[in-house]
Image (spheres, rainbow, N blue to C red):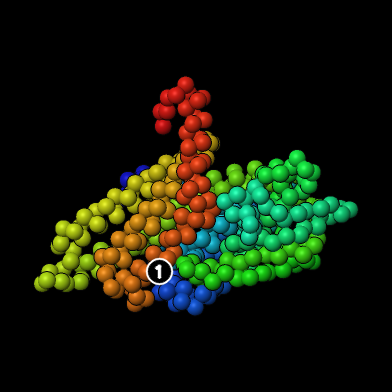
Amino acid sequence: MTLLALNETQKEIQQLARSFAQRELVALAGERDRESRFDRSMVTQMAELGFFGMLVPERFDGLGLDAQSYLLALEEIAVADASAAVLLSVHNSLPTQMILNFGTVEQQQEFLPPMARGEQLGAFALSEPEAGSDAGSLRCQAVRDGDDWVLTGTKAWVSHGSEAGVILCMARTDHSDDRRGSKGISTFILTPDLPGFHLGKKESKMGLRASPTLQINLDGCRVPGSRLLGAEGKGFVYALGSLDHGRLGIASQAIGIARAALEAAVRYAGERKQFGRNIAEFQAIQFKMSDMATRITAARTLLHAAAAAKERGENITRFSSMAKLFATETAMWVTTQAVQIFGGYGYVTDYPVERYFRDAKVTEIYEGTSEIQRIVIARETLAAAAAADGTLSD
């Protein structure tokens, strides 16, 4: 049962993703996690179903789905394997959307069709070792050299960067003294074949271990001038606008993780006996499960309300941050309760809830920490109140 009013296409996409995820992803998710192994065969399977082009128009070989259909599919993938979900989330929400919204016709024709078909995975390179939440302080430099740009610097926390064929990279192009902070940053379309492009350190992570995260080192990386995305100096604006959409994807991933934890806890509580009864009969366990289910439903409802607002063309900065904040903190809370319901068995790898717990944590961190989301929500709320003479109707 769902509170969402889904049309037939949305139901079909949801069922397609659920069937695929339960049939192809669940069984090996734990093994991939233990081995920190990225599975290219999984990419091939998802590509055949069109999952890498869910938000790309049909003229570029995509499915041309609405945001809600995409988020429904993403939740089903995350229930089965959060590492697979983050791959889809980053690819669909950030690089493809930035090229679609800000790229030239030539850039769109060159990159979007192979990305939509899953032949080239997309990645997003904004953060740096010294520029995380304060992304505007990035140091990566881009200098003109004839018709080319030469990029020098290190990008950090690039999800599936070792597997990507297209990387959207932010670098500073205005080096004047008064161009500090977020001003003077541009976006470039990088490919691994460019001279001076090098894969760096792969991170050993607590969760999402089947999704490789690494540094990218740009050692005088020579980028053709035609690879500048949009207007020079507008890259940070493009990145922040795309993160409004990307945060919806992270919220959906978090909801999927939380749902997997709840479903596992419900099954376990119906089988585990203590004091002569299934623990599902104890009120303490029932209260935990009721709160888990309520928070998940509330998070999903908020997420899809934000997605509907996006489809209407409204500014969703405040609501995407609300959705990410609430969904990711819900995921962390729900997975904690699931481990508690499992007791000692929740702490060992024989059961998947410890993986759900580990996977949930990073959703509160990447694409903007919970603290950053609260700053965004407060700023947008104050601005909305000022514009409406102190009255907030939504």
The residue drawn where x is 54% and y is 45% is: 244
Q: Is residue 113 left or right of residue 287?
A: right
- At mark 1, the secondary structure is helix
Residue pushed farthest left? 276
Q: Which sits in the foreground, 119 or 235?
A: 235
**Taking the image as drawn, is residue 339 in sight?**
yes
Q: Is residue 365 left or right of residue 339?
A: right
Q: Which sits in the foreground, 363 or 112?
A: 363
The quarter holding residue 350 reads bottom left
The residue drawn where x is 65% and y is 42% is: 237
- Circle 1: residue type: Arg
Q: Is residue 137 left or right of residue 64?
A: right
**Taking the image as drawn, is residue 53 in sight?**
no
Q: Is residue 26 above or below residue 184?
A: below
Q: How many marks?
A: 1
Neighbour tally class for label 1: few under 14, some 14-19, many 20 plus, Cα within 10 Å: many
Tell me where residue 375 appears, x and y as whole percent.
50, 42
Residue designated by label 1: 355
Where does the C terminus fall, quadrant-wise? top left
The residue drawn where x is 58% and y is 58% is: 91
Tell me where residue 232 appears, x and y as whole percent.
76, 44
Tell me where residue 165 appears, x and y as whole percent.
67, 64
Q: Is residue 99 above or below residue 159?
A: above
Q: Is residue 79 left or right of residue 111?
A: left
The residue drawn where x is 51% and y is 69% is: 205
Residue pushed farthest right? 146
Tell me where residue 295 appears, x and y as whole percent.
32, 50
